[in-house]
Amino acid sequence: MVAEQGEEERSPRRIALVVEYDGTAYGGSQYQKNSRTIQGEMEKALKKLTGERTRLALAGRTDAGVHAKGQMVSFRTWAPYEAEVFVRALNAHLPQDIVVRSAREVSLSFQVRRQAKRRWYRYLIYNGRQRPALRRGYCWHVAQPLDVEAMQEAARCLVGEHDLAAFAAPAAPGRTVRTVYRAEVSRRRSWVMFDIEANSFLTQQVRRTVGALVQVGLGKRTVQDFRRLLASAKRGAATEAAPPRGLCLMAVEYEGLSGSGDEENTDL
Protein backbone atom coordinates (compact mmCIF):
# COMPACT_ATOMS: atom_id res chain seq x y z
CA MET A 1 0.00 0.00 0.00
CA VAL A 2 1.09 3.61 -0.59
CA ALA A 3 1.87 5.45 2.64
CA GLU A 4 -0.66 8.17 3.45
CA GLN A 5 1.91 10.67 4.71
CA GLY A 6 2.59 13.36 2.10
CA GLU A 7 0.13 11.82 -0.34
CA GLU A 8 -1.47 15.21 -1.02
CA GLU A 9 1.92 16.51 -2.22
CA ARG A 10 2.46 13.86 -4.84
CA SER A 11 1.82 14.39 -8.52
CA PRO A 12 0.29 11.78 -10.81
CA ARG A 13 2.66 9.74 -12.98
CA ARG A 14 2.22 7.38 -15.90
CA ILE A 15 3.99 4.03 -15.95
CA ALA A 16 4.38 1.82 -19.04
CA LEU A 17 4.94 -1.92 -18.73
CA VAL A 18 6.03 -4.67 -21.13
CA VAL A 19 3.90 -7.70 -20.28
CA GLU A 20 4.12 -11.36 -21.28
CA TYR A 21 1.21 -13.74 -20.85
CA ASP A 22 -0.19 -17.12 -21.71
CA GLY A 23 -3.70 -16.35 -22.91
CA THR A 24 -5.05 -19.91 -22.64
CA ALA A 25 -7.12 -19.36 -19.50
CA TYR A 26 -8.38 -15.88 -20.39
CA GLY A 27 -11.30 -14.40 -22.31
CA GLY A 28 -8.93 -11.94 -23.97
CA SER A 29 -6.76 -9.02 -22.95
CA GLN A 30 -9.47 -6.40 -22.51
CA TYR A 31 -11.71 -6.22 -19.44
CA GLN A 32 -14.99 -8.15 -19.62
CA LYS A 33 -17.63 -8.24 -16.93
CA ASN A 34 -18.22 -12.01 -16.99
CA SER A 35 -14.83 -13.35 -18.03
CA ARG A 36 -11.32 -13.50 -16.58
CA THR A 37 -9.04 -11.19 -18.59
CA ILE A 38 -5.45 -9.95 -18.63
CA GLN A 39 -6.58 -6.39 -17.91
CA GLY A 40 -8.74 -7.53 -15.01
CA GLU A 41 -5.93 -9.52 -13.36
CA MET A 42 -3.45 -6.69 -13.77
CA GLU A 43 -5.83 -4.10 -12.32
CA LYS A 44 -6.37 -6.36 -9.29
CA ALA A 45 -2.60 -6.64 -8.82
CA LEU A 46 -2.19 -2.86 -9.10
CA LYS A 47 -4.91 -2.34 -6.48
CA LYS A 48 -3.06 -4.65 -4.08
CA LEU A 49 0.22 -2.81 -4.68
CA THR A 50 -0.88 0.82 -4.71
CA GLY A 51 -4.29 0.86 -3.03
CA GLU A 52 -5.59 2.72 -6.08
CA ARG A 53 -8.42 1.74 -8.42
CA THR A 54 -6.49 1.98 -11.67
CA ARG A 55 -7.76 1.67 -15.24
CA LEU A 56 -5.15 -0.01 -17.42
CA ALA A 57 -4.72 0.85 -21.12
CA LEU A 58 -3.40 -1.76 -23.57
CA ALA A 59 -1.58 -1.30 -26.89
CA GLY A 60 -3.17 -4.33 -28.52
CA ARG A 61 -6.44 -6.15 -27.91
CA THR A 62 -5.79 -9.88 -28.04
CA ASP A 63 -8.64 -12.38 -28.36
CA ALA A 64 -9.43 -15.24 -26.02
CA GLY A 65 -6.61 -17.80 -26.08
CA VAL A 66 -4.08 -15.48 -27.76
CA HIS A 67 -0.68 -14.99 -26.09
CA ALA A 68 1.79 -12.10 -25.80
CA LYS A 69 5.52 -11.69 -25.29
CA GLY A 70 5.61 -7.91 -25.74
CA GLN A 71 2.23 -6.42 -24.88
CA MET A 72 2.52 -2.77 -23.83
CA VAL A 73 0.24 -1.37 -21.13
CA SER A 74 0.17 1.87 -19.20
CA PHE A 75 -1.58 3.33 -16.19
CA ARG A 76 -1.69 6.49 -14.10
CA THR A 77 -0.65 6.33 -10.46
CA TRP A 78 0.30 8.47 -7.48
CA ALA A 79 2.51 5.69 -6.07
CA PRO A 80 6.12 6.83 -5.49
CA TYR A 81 7.82 3.55 -6.42
CA GLU A 82 10.77 3.31 -8.78
CA ALA A 83 9.97 1.60 -12.08
CA GLU A 84 11.81 -1.61 -11.13
CA VAL A 85 9.71 -1.90 -7.97
CA PHE A 86 6.59 -2.15 -10.12
CA VAL A 87 8.16 -5.11 -11.94
CA ARG A 88 9.03 -7.08 -8.80
CA ALA A 89 5.95 -6.19 -6.80
CA LEU A 90 3.39 -6.74 -9.54
CA ASN A 91 4.92 -10.12 -10.40
CA ALA A 92 4.47 -11.09 -6.74
CA HIS A 93 0.73 -10.37 -7.03
CA LEU A 94 0.04 -11.63 -10.57
CA PRO A 95 -0.90 -15.22 -11.50
CA GLN A 96 1.88 -17.40 -12.90
CA ASP A 97 0.70 -17.03 -16.51
CA ILE A 98 1.16 -13.21 -16.52
CA VAL A 99 4.61 -11.61 -16.09
CA VAL A 100 5.75 -7.97 -16.18
CA ARG A 101 9.05 -7.93 -18.11
CA SER A 102 9.99 -4.27 -17.69
CA ALA A 103 8.65 -0.90 -16.56
CA ARG A 104 9.44 2.74 -17.22
CA GLU A 105 7.97 6.12 -16.43
CA VAL A 106 6.56 7.98 -19.43
CA SER A 107 4.90 11.35 -19.88
CA LEU A 108 1.37 11.79 -18.53
CA SER A 109 0.19 12.49 -22.09
CA PHE A 110 1.49 9.12 -23.39
CA GLN A 111 -1.26 7.07 -25.08
CA VAL A 112 -0.19 3.45 -25.30
CA ARG A 113 -2.65 2.52 -28.05
CA ARG A 114 -2.81 5.62 -30.24
CA GLN A 115 0.91 6.36 -30.21
CA ALA A 116 2.02 2.85 -31.19
CA LYS A 117 3.77 3.01 -34.57
CA ARG A 118 3.82 -0.70 -35.36
CA ARG A 119 2.83 -4.01 -33.86
CA TRP A 120 4.42 -7.39 -34.52
CA TYR A 121 2.45 -10.62 -34.37
CA ARG A 122 3.73 -14.14 -34.93
CA TYR A 123 1.62 -17.19 -35.75
CA LEU A 124 3.16 -20.60 -35.15
CA ILE A 125 2.23 -23.78 -37.04
CA TYR A 126 3.56 -27.25 -36.32
CA ASN A 127 3.80 -28.94 -39.72
CA GLY A 128 4.64 -32.51 -38.72
CA ARG A 129 2.74 -35.75 -39.19
CA GLN A 130 2.19 -36.29 -35.46
CA ARG A 131 0.80 -33.62 -33.15
CA PRO A 132 3.26 -31.97 -30.76
CA ALA A 133 3.01 -32.62 -27.03
CA LEU A 134 5.21 -29.96 -25.46
CA ARG A 135 3.98 -26.88 -27.36
CA ARG A 136 0.48 -27.96 -28.20
CA GLY A 137 -1.00 -24.87 -26.49
CA TYR A 138 1.04 -22.47 -28.61
CA CYS A 139 0.63 -23.68 -32.18
CA TRP A 140 -1.77 -25.00 -34.81
CA HIS A 141 -1.01 -28.55 -35.87
CA VAL A 142 -1.29 -28.96 -39.66
CA ALA A 143 -0.30 -32.53 -40.52
CA GLN A 144 -0.30 -32.26 -44.34
CA PRO A 145 2.88 -30.86 -45.95
CA LEU A 146 2.79 -27.10 -46.55
CA ASP A 147 4.28 -25.34 -49.55
CA VAL A 148 6.02 -22.56 -47.62
CA GLU A 149 7.37 -20.90 -50.79
CA ALA A 150 3.84 -20.46 -52.16
CA MET A 151 2.68 -19.16 -48.78
CA GLN A 152 5.52 -16.65 -48.73
CA GLU A 153 4.71 -15.47 -52.25
CA ALA A 154 1.11 -14.90 -51.21
CA ALA A 155 2.14 -13.16 -47.98
CA ARG A 156 4.23 -10.63 -49.91
CA CYS A 157 0.99 -9.30 -51.46
CA LEU A 158 0.04 -7.94 -48.05
CA VAL A 159 2.93 -5.50 -47.74
CA GLY A 160 1.91 -1.88 -48.26
CA GLU A 161 -1.30 0.03 -47.65
CA HIS A 162 -4.38 -2.06 -48.40
CA ASP A 163 -8.02 -2.39 -47.55
CA LEU A 164 -7.84 -5.59 -45.48
CA ALA A 165 -11.57 -6.02 -45.00
CA ALA A 166 -11.40 -9.55 -46.46
CA PHE A 167 -9.35 -10.67 -43.45
CA ALA A 168 -11.48 -8.95 -40.80
CA ALA A 169 -14.24 -10.55 -38.79
CA PRO A 170 -17.58 -9.90 -40.51
CA ALA A 171 -18.77 -7.70 -37.65
CA ALA A 172 -15.48 -5.83 -37.20
CA PRO A 173 -16.26 -2.11 -36.83
CA GLY A 174 -14.64 0.90 -38.44
CA ARG A 175 -12.22 1.63 -41.23
CA THR A 176 -10.39 -1.37 -42.70
CA VAL A 177 -7.38 0.22 -44.44
CA ARG A 178 -4.07 -0.67 -42.78
CA THR A 179 -0.37 -0.40 -43.61
CA VAL A 180 1.59 -3.67 -43.46
CA TYR A 181 5.36 -3.24 -43.13
CA ARG A 182 6.38 -6.90 -43.13
CA ALA A 183 4.66 -10.20 -43.90
CA GLU A 184 6.89 -13.29 -43.99
CA VAL A 185 6.40 -17.05 -43.90
CA SER A 186 9.42 -19.13 -42.89
CA ARG A 187 10.22 -22.67 -41.80
CA ARG A 188 12.50 -24.08 -39.11
CA ARG A 189 12.38 -27.85 -39.42
CA SER A 190 8.74 -28.79 -38.65
CA TRP A 191 7.82 -25.30 -37.46
CA VAL A 192 6.26 -22.80 -39.87
CA MET A 193 6.07 -19.17 -38.73
CA PHE A 194 4.07 -16.28 -40.09
CA ASP A 195 5.40 -12.89 -38.94
CA ILE A 196 3.48 -9.73 -39.70
CA GLU A 197 4.10 -6.11 -38.69
CA ALA A 198 1.59 -3.34 -39.30
CA ASN A 199 0.51 0.00 -37.92
CA SER A 200 -2.56 -1.67 -36.40
CA PHE A 201 -4.75 -4.73 -36.90
CA LEU A 202 -8.39 -5.56 -37.48
CA THR A 203 -10.36 -8.03 -35.38
CA GLN A 204 -9.22 -11.60 -36.26
CA GLN A 205 -7.07 -10.24 -39.09
CA VAL A 206 -3.98 -12.34 -38.40
CA ARG A 207 -5.87 -15.56 -37.74
CA ARG A 208 -7.96 -15.22 -40.92
CA THR A 209 -4.85 -14.33 -42.92
CA VAL A 210 -3.11 -17.45 -41.62
CA GLY A 211 -6.16 -19.55 -42.49
CA ALA A 212 -6.02 -18.32 -46.09
CA LEU A 213 -2.24 -18.79 -46.29
CA VAL A 214 -2.54 -22.37 -45.08
CA GLN A 215 -5.09 -22.98 -47.83
CA VAL A 216 -2.41 -21.77 -50.28
CA GLY A 217 0.18 -24.02 -48.63
CA LEU A 218 -2.10 -27.03 -48.97
CA GLY A 219 -2.81 -26.30 -52.65
CA LYS A 220 -6.47 -25.50 -51.98
CA ARG A 221 -5.97 -21.90 -53.10
CA THR A 222 -3.51 -20.46 -55.59
CA VAL A 223 -1.41 -17.37 -54.97
CA GLN A 224 -3.62 -15.62 -57.51
CA ASP A 225 -6.70 -16.67 -55.49
CA PHE A 226 -5.11 -15.06 -52.44
CA ARG A 227 -4.46 -11.85 -54.38
CA ARG A 228 -8.08 -11.78 -55.54
CA LEU A 229 -9.24 -12.34 -51.96
CA LEU A 230 -7.19 -9.36 -50.78
CA ALA A 231 -8.38 -7.18 -53.68
CA SER A 232 -12.04 -8.03 -53.05
CA ALA A 233 -12.04 -5.93 -49.83
CA LYS A 234 -15.20 -7.86 -48.92
CA ARG A 235 -15.53 -7.92 -45.15
CA GLY A 236 -15.09 -11.43 -43.76
CA ALA A 237 -14.38 -13.03 -47.15
CA ALA A 238 -11.52 -15.07 -45.65
CA THR A 239 -13.67 -17.51 -43.75
CA GLU A 240 -11.01 -19.90 -42.41
CA ALA A 241 -9.72 -18.49 -39.10
CA ALA A 242 -6.70 -20.25 -37.60
CA PRO A 243 -7.04 -21.29 -33.92
CA PRO A 244 -6.15 -18.54 -31.41
CA ARG A 245 -3.57 -20.64 -29.53
CA GLY A 246 -0.94 -20.21 -32.28
CA LEU A 247 -1.00 -16.41 -32.19
CA CYS A 248 1.33 -14.24 -30.12
CA LEU A 249 1.78 -10.46 -29.89
CA MET A 250 5.58 -10.20 -30.02
CA ALA A 251 6.27 -6.46 -29.67
CA VAL A 252 4.86 -2.97 -29.95
CA GLU A 253 7.05 -0.09 -31.16
CA TYR A 254 6.89 3.63 -30.41
CA GLU A 255 8.81 6.60 -31.73
CA GLY A 256 11.46 7.60 -29.21
CA LEU A 257 10.67 4.69 -26.90
CA SER A 258 13.19 1.94 -27.59
CA GLY A 259 12.96 -1.57 -26.22
CA SER A 260 9.17 -1.71 -26.13
CA GLY A 261 9.22 -5.41 -26.91
CA ASP A 262 10.99 -8.31 -25.19
CA GLU A 263 14.06 -8.60 -27.38
CA GLU A 264 15.54 -11.44 -25.33
CA ASN A 265 12.56 -13.70 -25.83
CA THR A 266 11.49 -13.67 -29.48
CA ASP A 267 12.63 -17.13 -30.61
CA LEU A 268 10.39 -20.14 -30.99
Image (spheres, rainbow, N blue to C red):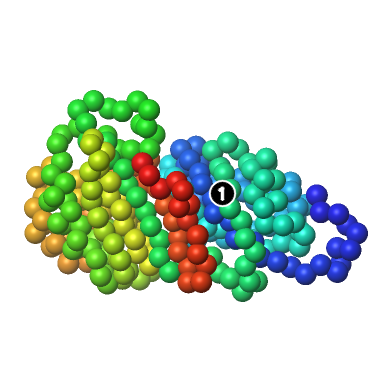
51 on left or right of 252: right
Quadrant of the drawing holding the C terminus: top left
Q: Which residue is mark 1?
A: 101
Q: Can residue 156 be seen from the camera position used here?
A: yes
Q: Position of residue 216 (x, y in %)?
A: 14, 49
Q: Nearer the viewer, residue 142 or 148?
A: 148
- The residue located at (44%, 56%) in the rendering is 251
Q: Position of residue 220 (x, y in %)?
A: 10, 45
Q: Position of residue 202 (x, y in %)?
A: 36, 61
Q: Assign a secondary structure to mark 1.
A: strand
171 on left or right of 231: right
Image label count: 1
187 on left or right of 73: left
Q: Nearer the viewer, residue 152 or 171?
A: 152
- The residue located at (89%, 63%) in the rendering is 6
Q: Position of residue 203 (x, y in %)?
A: 37, 57
Q: What amino acid type is highlighted by mark number 1?
A: Arg
